[in-house]
Image (spheres, grey):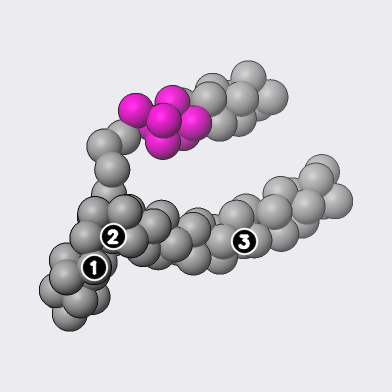
Amino acid sequence: MKYFLLAILLGTCFFLLVAPAADAQCSICAKSVQQMGTKPAEGFNSGIIYLMVIPYAAIGIIGFRWWRSNR
């Protein structure tokens, strides 16, 4: 079980590192950001990805602590 969880963690990290840059903008935001240039657009994309990851990380931490306490 320990090696299975480690394999999942390493696989997830690998796919996150080799994944192409995600364009996580809605069409309205994309039009607004295109007018600002490339640097603000990259920062805007990074901010959207950051805001998307936080809830998943929080749920993962809560789930892990719950699993560990019930084990």
Q: Report the front residue among 8 and 42.
A: 42
Report which residue position mark 2 lands on: 41
User: Which residue shows up at 17% across the image and 66% down it?
Assistant: 34
| Residue 30 shows in this picture | no
Quadrant of res 62: bottom right
Amino acid carrying mark 3 in the image:
Ile
Q: 10 Å neighbourhood of mark 1: few (<14), some, or many (≥20)?
A: few
Residue 11 position, x and y percent, is 46, 26
Amino acid carrying mark 2 in the image:
Ala
Residue 50 position, x and y percent, is 49, 58
The numbered mark at residue 36 is 1
Q: Secondary structure at mark 1?
A: loop
Q: Mark 3, mark 1: which one is toward the viewer?
A: 1
Q: Is residue 29 left or right of residue 50?
A: left
- Circles 3 and 1: CB distance less than 8 Å? no
Residue 41 position, x and y percent, is 28, 60
User: Which residue shows up at 17% across the image and 70% down it?
Assistant: 35
Q: In the displayed structure, would residue 51 be above or below residue 12?
A: below
N-term-proximal mark, 2 vs 1: 1
Q: Mark 2, mark 1: which one is toward the viewer?
A: 1
Q: Is residue 53 left or right of residue 25?
A: right
Q: Report the front residue among 56 and 21.
A: 21
Q: Which residue is outermost to the top?
A: 3
Q: Is residue 17 left or right of residue 19?
A: right
Q: Mark 3, mark 2: which one is toward the viewer?
A: 2
Amino acid carrying mark 1 in the image:
Met
Report which residue position mark 3 lands on: 59
- Circles 2 and 1: CB distance less than 8 Å? yes
- Point out the image quarter for the N terminus: top right
Residue range highlighted in magenta: 12-18
User: Which residue shows up at 49% across the image and 65% down it?
Assistant: 51
